[in-house]
Image (cartoon, rainbow, N blue to C red):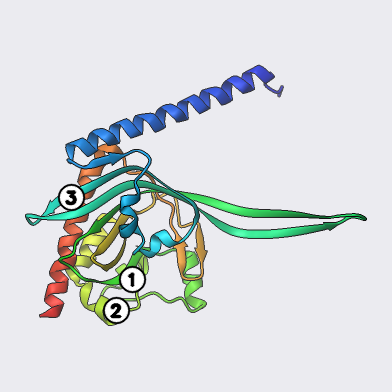
């Protein structure tokens, strides 16, 4: 098989680059339209105003070269009351392995650093609702690497009444008793039907989609598994927002029942 002529290779690379630029621009334009429809402010390159929201969630404490784009920010109504929401595309890089090699020559020392990294990209929704106070927890799909992590001492919370749920999900929290009270049958059914990852603490709730079926969690480090996912398509942002608000309602309902 003959190699492609050099000019064809350059043309192919240029065509791929132009295609990527077009898709990025098209997504930004479509999401800006969605933001207007939802009456949310739009920041194509993100905005530092969301720092207080993301700084309280462990999800955003890991990774390098973190980037926020296509940020939609403002307030939506939940049960007639305003709730602050931020919806944005988020990418970050995890270093799986890093090594440094030293080469000693007669008059000098050469240092070469190598790293094995992987980048994750997701559309996330973050809520701030001062009317609720959720126990801290994270929930996502459970995979083989998680089971190996359990043997290393990073055990998730298994709910004996819901073995299928416990088998398919990894639920972590330092407030085990509160979490067992919170996860009632209505909440279990919601997660089984809708397949969304969640992190919560106090008035903050983070939601993002499960990875597609053909993907799996690709990296587990200690008690942390970094889950590949995909961007939410512009047409699906409103339904996903409504679904996430439904989850917030369920969490509030169960918390109220526990306190009574």
Where disc 2 sits, the SS reads: loop
Where disc 3 sits, the SS reads: strand
Counting other residues with Cα less than 10 Å from the Cα at mark 3, is it few (<14), some (14-19), or many (20 or more)?
Answer: some
In the image, what residue occupies the spot 27% across and 39% down?
A: 42
Q: Which mark is residue 160?
A: 2
Residue 124 in view (yes/no): no
Coordinates of residue 146 in the picture (x, y in percent): 46, 68
In 3D space, how far apart are the residues under numbered discs 1 and 2 (Cα atoms)? 8 Å
Look at the picture and state if 14 lies above or below 77: above
In the image, what residue occupies the spot 27% across and 82% down?
A: 177
Which image quadrant is residue 197 in?
bottom left
Q: Are marks 1 and 2 in contact (CB under 8 Å)?
A: yes
Q: Name the front one of labels 3 and 1.
A: 3
Coordinates of residue 223 in the picture (x, y in percent): 46, 70
Look at the picture and state if 235 lies above or below 190: above
Where disc 1 sits, the SS reads: helix
């Amino acid at each position: 098989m003959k190699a492609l002529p050099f000019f064809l290779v350059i043309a192919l690379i240029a065509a791929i680059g132009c295609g990527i630029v077009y898709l990025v621009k098209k997504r930004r334009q479509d999401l800006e339209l969605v933001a207007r429809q939802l009456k949310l402010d739009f920041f194509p390159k993100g905005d530092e105003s969301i720092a207080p929201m993301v700084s309280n969630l462990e999800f955003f404490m890991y990774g390098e070269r973190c980037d926020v784009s296509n940020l939609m920010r403002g307030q939506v109504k939940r049960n007639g009351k305003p709730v602050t929401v931020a919806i944005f595309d988020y990418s970050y890089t995890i270093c799986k392995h890093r090594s440094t090699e030293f080469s000693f020559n007669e008059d000098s020392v050469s240092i070469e650093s190598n790293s094995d990294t992987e980048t994750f990209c997701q559309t996330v929704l973050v809520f701030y609702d001062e009317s609720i106070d959720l126990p801290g927890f994270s929930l996502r799909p459970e995979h083989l690497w998680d089971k190996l992590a359990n043997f290393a001492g990073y055990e998730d919370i298994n709910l004996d009444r819901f073995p299928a749920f416990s088998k398919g999900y990894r639920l972590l929290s330092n407030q085990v008793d509160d979490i067992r009270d919170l996860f009632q049958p209505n909440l279990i059914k919601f997660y089984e039907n809708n397949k969304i990852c969640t992190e919560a603490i106090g008035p903050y709730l983070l939601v993002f989609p499960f990875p597609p079926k053909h993907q799996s969690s690709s990296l587990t480090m200690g008690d942390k598994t970094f889950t590949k996912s995909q961007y939410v398509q512009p047409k699906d942002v409103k339904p996903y927002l409504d679904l996430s608000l439904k989850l917030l309602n369920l969490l509030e309902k169960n918390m109220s029942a526990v306190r009574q």
